[in-house]
Each structure stands twice: as structure tokens, then as C-alpha cells.
Amino acid sequence: MAELVAKDRSQGWASYLDEGEEILWQDRPDPGFHMTQEDYALAGFGLVFACFAAVWMFAAASSGSIFWVFGSIHFLVGLGLFVGGVYWNTYRRQHSWYALSSRRAFIATDLPWRGRRLKYWPITADSPIKLDFGPPDSVWFAIEMQRGRSRMHEVPIGFERIPDGRAVVRLIRRVQEGQG
């Protein structure tokens, strides 16, 4: 995976391509609301965390103590986890663009606090390809290791929730065979 900076923004994807490289496919993910099992887990944890903090704040306030204020931080964290679990992945997909070239897969995003980013992954004969049938389909073509709280874990990278994943897999296979 690497990040690119545009040579000339007026040319779209072409400004990111190497000589002899061409765009084979481009699209955007389905912008509709959708939650995964991980999203439900995060939202559920955030809701429980926020409710526990609210109960603690109420108990602290009932005792006449000012300590209830410290619970507001935990309440806001829980609320943030809940809202993030429910909406973040949908929002991220709504601000993403995909492209497949004769050599690489590109994912462009424009997100708050992160700004505009373009990452790419080379498509080689060894690239792991997985198709999750939809509709909409998702095509996974790389795996990244990310650090969690206590350990590293694998995160699949790919084109999420696209209209015709089967056609994209056929194009990726052509690239893998050197026919891209």
C-alpha cells in the first residue's frame, strides 16, 4: 500500500498512473446505510458504556456531589462509540472512490480530520482475491495488519459494496495473469 499525490488534478485518475498503465474500471461504493456485525458490536458497546455513565452521573448528582461532571466524559465517549458504530462506515463509503488499473487497485477518500487520501495496492499473481456476494458485492484484494488495543489483527482491503463484483474479479484476474 502506498499513498500518491496528484500530478495534475484536472486529469482525474490519469494523473496518478505510470507510463503504460491504464484504468480498467472505476466506480463508487453503494452510498446506502449498511451496518456490519462489527458496527453492531461497537454501537452496542457504546450504548452500554453511555448508559452506565448516565446512571453513574445520576447517582453522583443525587448525592449532591460535583463528581457527576467526571461521568460526562465517559458518557460522551460512549455516545461517540455508538454514533460511530452506526454511521461511520456508511459515511466513509459515501466519501470514497475506487479504480482498478492494469497494475494497481486505488481507493480514494475525502474524510474529515484525514483530508483527501489516495492509497493503492499493486495487483500481483499472489494478491489474495475474495468475492463477497451481495448485492451489492464486495471484492477484497489485500490484507493489512493493524494494531488493536492488545494485538495486531488482519484488516481486509478492497472495493466494498459495488454493483458488479464478478466483473471486477474477472478484471483483477486478467491483471494477475499479465493481460491487464
Image (spheres, rainbow, N blue to C red):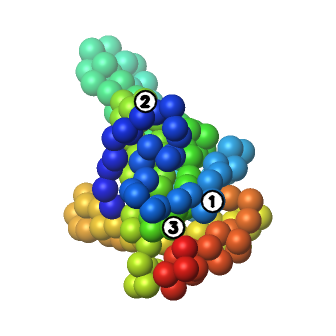
Residue 102 tag number: 3
| Inter-mark Cα distance, 1 to 3 | 9 Å
Q: How crowded is mark 3: few (under 14 residues within 10 Å), some or many (20 or more)?
A: many
Residue 118 vertical position relative to residue 78 in the rendered view, above or below = below
Q: Is mark 2 on a helix, strand or loop?
A: loop
Q: Name the residue under label 2.
A: 112
Q: Name the residue under label 1.
A: 25
Cα distance between the residues tagged 2 and 1: 27 Å
> Which dot, 2 or 1, sits closer to the camera?
1
Calculate the distance from the C-alpha at mark 3 to the C-alpha at mark 2: 31 Å
| Label 2 or label 1, whichever comes before in sequence order | 1
Residue 176, position in %: x, y? 49, 81
Q: Residues within 10 Å of mark 2 (few under 14, many from 20)?
A: few
- Circles 1 and 3, Cβ within 8 Å, touching? The answer is no
Quadrant the C terminus occupies: bottom right
Does label 1 or label 3 sit earlier along the sequence?
1
Three-letter code for the amino acid on which mark 2 is drawn: Pro
